Amino acid sequence: MKVTVVGAGNVGATCADILAYREVVNEVVLVDIKEGMAEGKALDIWQKAPIDMYDTRTVGVTADYSRTANSDVVVITSGLPRKPGMSRDDLIETNAGIVKSVTEQVVAHSPNAIIIVVSNPLDVMTYQAHITSKLPRTKVIGMAGILDTARYRAFLAEALNVSPKDIQAMLLGGHGDTMVPLPRYTTVGGIPVTELIDADKLNAIIERTKVGGGELVKLMGTSAWYAPGSAAAQMVEAIVRDQKRVVPVCIKLEGEYGIDNCYLGVPVVLGKNGVEKVIELQLDEKEMSDLRTSRDHVMEVMNVLDKINNK
Ligand SMILES: NC(=O)c1ccc[n+]([C@@H]2O[C@H](COP(=O)([O-])OP(=O)(O)OC[C@H]3O[C@@H](n4cnc5c(N)ncnc54)[C@H](O)[C@@H]3O)[C@@H](O)[C@H]2O)c1
Ligand SMILES: O=C(O)C[C@H](O)C(=O)O
């Protein structure tokens, strides 16, 4: 199995490192536009192999997509990260062009690959990759929900002083401040979270989760990479090992949740064919209304992308 990671920056290199370290595939190809960057990071990861005892080959190339040919999965992380004071949507103009040209080259060399988009604004960059690739919606998906639920789970584990391993959670919607964490679908060792934490504390955690990316941007001056790289690697692993993981993933909705033609995070079954099933949860009125608010926001940014593409 072969995986390409486009963008050898913070998120891309972290994802490649985890894929190699865990021997998820035989070969990881890192691609970047900056001369020498991908080659250097791939070599560094390969030189770690004798220490950490793995044998996944890591190869780096500067914009040479012939080396990515016949990849099974391609992760697109190329693009600008935001700086303090910016929203993810502020990245659209630059990143739309990058994701479009990268997707064209990826598909030309790996027409059967499953594409995982990471670049921001996530839901709309997934839209960009999907329309550019012309692949089925089940094969062009976005990473955000695994990261957002991980933040939510980590905050809960800290507040309850329990292991993060025992916290299960689901979350819907766009990868932005309108995301919809679902306390009704959150459990701690099988126990509904609402039995273990009071409502005010839970609400504070939900609000912190929604701006979890921004919290890190403020602290570091650029956006996060350890958890995002790991979340993307988890999606790759689910696909190449056909694990049928049930995780939140961004996909084009075609009528699910009463929503059509919008790219949003929803629970899916992720396996060798990409998204093998979209799971429709029974939502109450408030959850549904929050999801519609998130949809409205993503649709607005999708309209901005349409205008950029039609210029
Ligand atoms: N979906 C998520 O949850 C999530 C999480 C974290 C970051 N992100 C997004 O991921 C993207 C990357 O973040 P980062 O921290 O790794 O940034 P980074 O600046 O560290 O890395 C981006 C890399 O992309 C490369 N690049 C730019 N244009 C390219 C092109 N045309 N072809 C190949 N490579 C190209 C750059 O040279 C750079 O090395 C950003 O858009 C960021 O907002 C998304
Ligand atoms: O917050 C960002 O800009 C990056 C990413 O979307 C994140 O949530 O960490």
Image: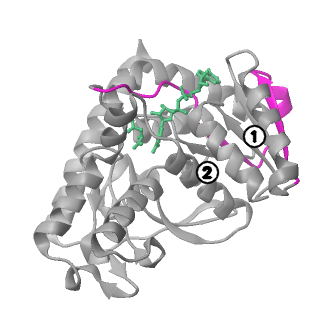
Q: Amino acid at mark 2?
A: Lys
Give residue 204's position: percent from left, percent from top.
Answer: 17, 60
Compared with 287, 38 (above or below) is above
Give residue 152's position: percent from left, percent from top.
Answer: 34, 61
Q: Which residues are magenta?
A: 55-84
Q: Amino acid at mark 1?
A: Pro
The image quadrant of residue 187 is bottom left
Q: Is residue 65 magenta?
A: yes
Q: Residues within 10 Å of mark 1 (few under 14, many from 20)?
A: some
Question: Is disc 2's CB within 8 Å of ligand 1?
Answer: no
Q: Is residue 234 magenta?
A: no
Question: In terms of secondary structure, where does tag 1 sit?
Answer: loop
The residue carrying mark 2 is: 139
Q: Is residue 206 left or right of residue 137?
A: left
The residue carrying mark 1 is: 111
Sooner in the amino-acid sequence: mark 2 or mark 1: 1
Question: In terms of secondary structure, where does tag 2 sit?
Answer: helix
Give residue 236's position: percent from left, percent from top.
Answer: 66, 55
Measured in 3D between alpha carbons, the distance from the residue under mark 2 to the one under mark 1, in whole angstroms, is: 11 Å
